[in-house]
Amino acid sequence: MTHAPSHGPSHAHSHGPASPHPAQPASWSILRMTLVARLGAALAVSAGLWAVVWLSMR
């Protein structure tokens, strides 16, 4: 299996075909969120899931 054709002829690689792609900088990470923000996000997701359950049982 070759590596280059999937990226097209204009894409230059800086790693060998057997090594994985280098890590990309993350624009967003849950690990960078404060504890309060994580708890708020968890509460929002939980409320959204409960809303789906509530609406499906109506």
Image (tube, rainbow, N blue to C red):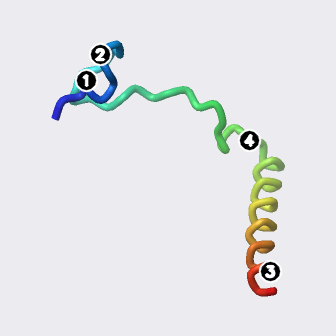
Q: Nearer the viewer, mark 1 or mark 4?
A: 1
State the residue in front, 53 or 47.
53
Q: CA distance from mark 1 to mark 3?
A: 50 Å
Q: Is residue 27 above or below residue 48?
A: above
In percent of width and height, residue 52 lies at: 75, 73
Considering only order in the chain, which callout, 4 or 1, is on the residue closer to the N terminus? 1
Point out the tag, 1 or 3, that comes first from the N-terminus: 1
Report, in whole angstroms, how far the alpha carbon at label 4 lies from the one at label 3: 29 Å
Residue 24 x/y as whole percent: 50, 27
Please name the amino acid that badge 2 sits on. Pro
Crowding around mark 4 (Cα neighbors within 10 Å: few <14, some 14 to 19, many 20+) is few
Front-most of residues 45 and 8:
8
Position of 54 relative to 41 (above/below): below
x and y percent of residue 16 in the render? 24, 21
In this image, 24 relative to 6: left or right?
right
Q: Which residue is mark 4?
A: 33
Residue 21 vertical placement versus 46 (above, below): above
Q: Which mark is residue 55?
A: none
For badge 3, the amino acid type reads Trp
Residue 57: where, in percent of width, then height? 77, 86
Residues tagged 3 and 2 counted as in contact (Cβ below 8 A): no
Kind of residue sitting beneath label 4: Met
Q: Amino acid at mark 1?
A: Ala
Residue 36 in the image: above or below residue 19:
below
Q: Which mark is residue 54?
A: 3
